[in-house]
Image (tube, rainbow, N blue to C red):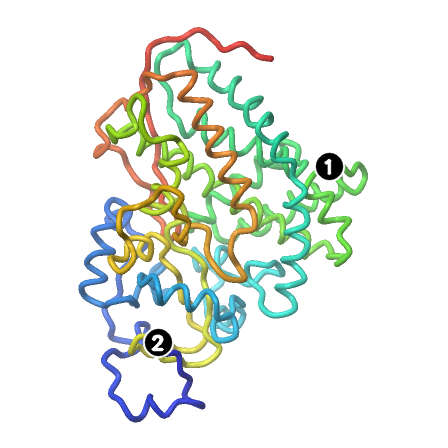
Amino acid sequence: MSLTTPQHSTQAHACPVPHASPVETGVTRVALYTEEFAADPHRAYREMRRRYGSLVPVDLAPDVPATLVIGYHTAVQILNDPEHFPSDPRSWQKNVPSDCPILPMLEWRPNALRSAGLEHTRYRQANTVAIDEIDLFSLHSAVEQVAVPLINSFCERGTADLISQYAFPLTFAVLNSMLGCPPDIGQQVAKALAAMFEGVDADKINTTLTNALFDLLTRKRAEPGDDITSRLLAHQNQLDDAELINQLVTLYGAGIEPLQNLIVNTLLLMLTDDRFAGVGPSTRDALNELLFTDPPLANFSITYPRQPILIDGVWLPAHQPVIISMAGCNNDPAIHDGEYTDNNSHLAWGAGPHACPAKSVAYLVAQNAIDQLLDALPDLRLACPADQLSWRPGPFHRALVSMPVVFPESPPLKVF
């Protein structure tokens, strides 16, 4: 694989380029935001690979072109090359309409996710310190304290929707606890972030997030605690209010929607695959397999090349989004051999300088949430055939609309 720029490359002139830029005018692009794509993305990835190879021209929203990376080795090189592929979108968004539905998801913010160089280092340090001080042993107890009352709220009925009645309220409550955020503020943030992932209400999202999180900062300055927000406020890098708010936006964005989907999608795998019935592969095995085969954040890790660059025989234009398909790359036949146990080579957590700093926390919460539910309701099963479940459209997530289940009516669990 070659990475060359016009200023330094003789290869670009000596050899013909087999493909034009994936985002130039006239190229047929694959729409990632449609219900058709959401219903069967893996068929779409296979067709993309057959037609385009490792780099695919896509639309993230109507008339919002990007390049989707579905080749594993290509993605790893891009993710580990922030010099050529920085994550700062400011040059790109200059020409993006303010009402673009996915602008709140991609636009520049003063946070680790959307910055490069020294700015990225400064934000990343503050986030890493704040997250690393989470007590994982106490977190195990925190998940149980949330899970048991949730299970008790529906166990006597024999039916439930595992998203609205379990996975979402659990991730919401646990994240609020880690951030020291009262439920009233967290509820505002959760609604705004759900709209952000789906690309709706773009004009209202930033205002809602800013107001809610400024309120949180005000409360934590008055009463600091043993939580992520207080540690960010106290960090030696001295982030200002705008920077603090945007670190929290990132933490909420990564901590609610993807974690909820990780729990639900892993449960779907375990309830529909006979290998996980009875004594068989563990929850940990199921999580590893799901992260490989159908990661909850399917397409993300967005970068913007500084200048036109040749990669895999394709010219990528400057300042246009290059989005890594974790789902497509993990299922790349070049590396996908069906071995998932203790295999952490997947890209579900990203890679390189922008890799997820909270993967141990997310993994622990998901595993404990699943184990709590299945221990309490071991005969849990889907209330409908799996192929009748509906997936939410959107270019980034892999998310069910709902997950109805049935089980024998059970007495409430004891609350300790």
Residue occupying image coordinates x 53% and y 17%:
149
Q: Say whether disc 2 or disc 1 marks the residue closer to the N-terminus.
A: 1
Q: Is residue 249 above or below residue 11?
A: above
Horizontal and vertical percent position of residue 196: 47, 49
The image quadrant of residue 291 is top left
Left or right of 164: which side holds 187?
Answer: right
Task: Identify residue for label 2.
Answer: 311
Q: From the image, which quarter does the N terminus lie in?
A: bottom left
Residue furthest out toward the right: 222
Check residue 199 in the rendering and tell me which mark sits there, or answer none.
none
Q: Is residue 369 above or below residue 217?
A: above
Q: Is residue 80 above or below residue 241?
A: below
- The residues tagged by marks 2 and 1 sit, at their Cα atoms, a distance apart of 46 Å
Residue occupying image coordinates x 45% and y 81%:
307
Left or right of 229: which side holds 364?
Answer: left
Residue occupying image coordinates x 45% and y 74%:
305
Residue sitting nearer the eye, 334 or 15: 334
Residue occupying image coordinates x 24% and y 50%:
42
The residue type indicated by label 2 comes to Ile
Residue 164 visible in the snapshot: yes
Task: Identify residue for label 1.
Answer: 226
Q: Is residue 368 above or below residue 150?
A: below
Q: From the image, which quarter does the C terminus lie in?
A: top right
Residue sitting nearer the eye, 200 or 42: 42
